[in-house]
Image (cartoon, rainbow, N blue to C red):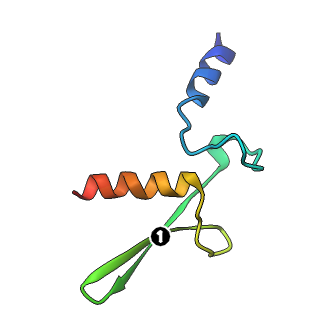
Amino acid sequence: MVRKMTASFSKLAFWRSDDTKDTRPASDIQYRVQVKGMGDTSLVQVVTREGGIDKSDAARKILGMLNDQLK
């Protein structure tokens, strides 16, 4: 029963993609959202652990959800 529940919850992990090479469990994957002031506006980006811009599908989904919440 526990195994079946875990499999069901893993389907909810929208930020994971099938083509990713990251084999860590979803609970180990972290995303960093960086906000920089740029005059009268702000630049919001998802960055990797190394500090580069994350252009993955998961990053786009995170930014989309943030945008929806700020409307």
Q: Residue at x 72, y 45 (%)?
A: 19
Specify whether 53 is left or right of 50: left
Q: Residue at x 53, y 32 (%)?
A: 12
Q: Amino acid at mark 1?
A: Gln
Specify whether 17 is left or right of 69: right
How many numbered circles does the render carry? 1
Instruction: List the single residue furthest toward the top.
Output: 1
In the displayed structure, would residue 51 be above or below residue 64?
below
Q: Residue at x 60, y 57 (%)?
A: 56
Disc 1: which residue: 45
Residue 6, by quadrant, is top right
Quarter of the image that includes the N terminus? top right
Foreground residue, 62 or 9? 62
Question: Horizontal and vertical percent for residue 14?
Answer: 53, 40
Question: Horizontal and vertical percent for residue 18?
Answer: 69, 40
In the displayed structure, would residue 36 be above or below residue 34?
below
Residue 11, by quadrant, is top right
Q: Residue at x 64, y 42 (%)?
A: 26
In the displayed structure, would residue 35 be above or below residue 59?
below
Q: Crowding at label 1, few (<14), some or many (≥20) Cα neighbours within 10 Å?
A: some
Secondary structure, mark 1, is: strand
